[in-house]
Amino acid sequence: MESDGGEGTVMASDIKAVGVVGGGFMGSGIAESTAIAGLPVIVFEADPVRRSGLLDRIGKSLSRAVGGGKIEQADMDDALERIAVADDLRDIADVDLAIEVVPEDLKLKLEVMRSIEADVSHDALIASNTSSIPIAELAGALQRPERVCGLHFFAPVPVMKLVEIVVALDTSTETIVKARRFCEVIGKRSIETKDRSGFVVNMLLVPYLMAGVRMYEEEFATPEDIDQGMRLGCGHPMGPLELCDFIGLDVLYEVCNSIYEEFKRDEYAPPPILKRMVASGRFGRKSGRGFYEYGNKAG
């Protein structure tokens, strides 16, 4: 598969192995999508409990795809064979692309990005899956910022086709082309965006979601009616409060704060009720309770 232009010719085969740092919901989804596309992937997760269950979680996701007729059992077996779970971050040393997928905490992400750069080769691409932190703020802490970009995936990764490629001030053309080709290889459609907090999708999505949260906070309508209004009136597959619960209220709170900090516009500010729900451990589906009750934790 040849490059469609740009500086030099970059082949998809330049990315022969992928490292994923962070084995949570998003990280495991990126690993699954990469492996099912035929690329070997090494996943490092610092939490030993989460790390021990990583392959089982990916296997369950692939089993659902088999049950739904999306892939064959042989495809699932081959994909699992391509996934290695690392006990040490240094095990990703030989990858051509390392993707950081840790929580939305700037200090943590900077620490992880520096560690990745210390371990991978001089030519390896380094990407962040951040949904709101400017890439320049992460790349600026590294010695070679030109090989850094954002690869913002959407949940659930195996289902959602979009990846935002975030281009920072120092990101090279070669890095962009390689990132674009990687997205193609794993069956995703990419869009490119300048490096500003929120990128394309969250800049549009967050004000909509926060409007729904404010309606709830002001008791303007019930959560069920708010969501049903958008599902039936606008054809959305989920209403805003359902989607908040699915994304994770803790994640949304950090995204809102990041975008608001950059633009100081009220529509991006998290409403007070969101802060209190997060402080109370009401994160949405993953904690079993958000705007709705989910019984057992949804994972």
Image (tube, rainbow, N blue to C red):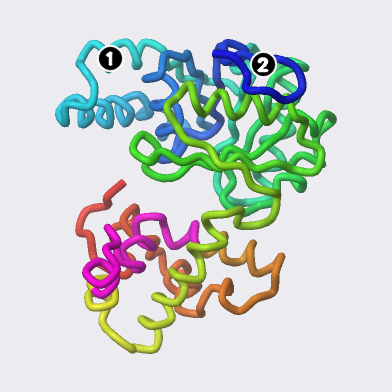
Mostly what secondary structure, the magenta segment?
Answer: helix
Q: Name the residue under label 2.
A: 10
Residue 265 lies, with reference to residue 54, above or below; the image says: below
Rate crowding at label 2 as few (under 14), some (14 to 19) or many (20 or more) other CA atoms within 10 Å. some
Q: Residue at x 77, y 17 (%)?
A: 122
Question: Is residue 135 a member of the stretch shown in magenta?
Answer: no
- Estimate the x, y position of residue 108 in percent, counting from the top left: 65, 45
Give the CA separation, mark 2 to mark 1: 28 Å
Residue 83 lies, with reference to residue 156, above or below; the image says: above
Which of pointers 2 and 1 indicates the residue nearer the eye? 2
Q: Where, quadrant-wise, is the N terminus in this rendering? A: top right
- Estimate the x, y position of residue 186 in percent, counting from the top left: 45, 24
Residue extending farthest to the front is: 5
What segment is highlighted magenta in the picture? 229-252
- Is 43 or 31 nearer to us in this picture? 31
Quadrant for residue 29, please give it.
Answer: top left
- Is 96 or 181 nearer to us in this picture? 181
Quadrant for residue 124, please give it.
Answer: top right
Rate crowding at label 1 as few (under 14), some (14 to 19) or many (20 or more) other CA atoms within 10 Å. some
Q: Which of marks 2 and 1 is nearer the N terminus?
A: 2
Quadrant for residue 219, please give it.
Answer: bottom left
- Estimate the x, y position of residue 112 in percent, counting from the top left: 66, 36
Q: Mark 1 points at which residue?
A: 75
Identify the amino acid type marked 2.
Val
Identify the amino acid type marked 1.
Asp
Left or right: 182, with 66 as reference point:
right
- Is 280 or 101 nearer to us in this picture? 101
Q: Is mark 1 on a helix, strand or loop?
A: helix
Question: Is residue 235 a member of the stretch shown in magenta?
Answer: yes
Q: Residue at x 42, y 32 (%)?
A: 28
CB of mark 2 within 8 Å of CB of mark 1?
A: no
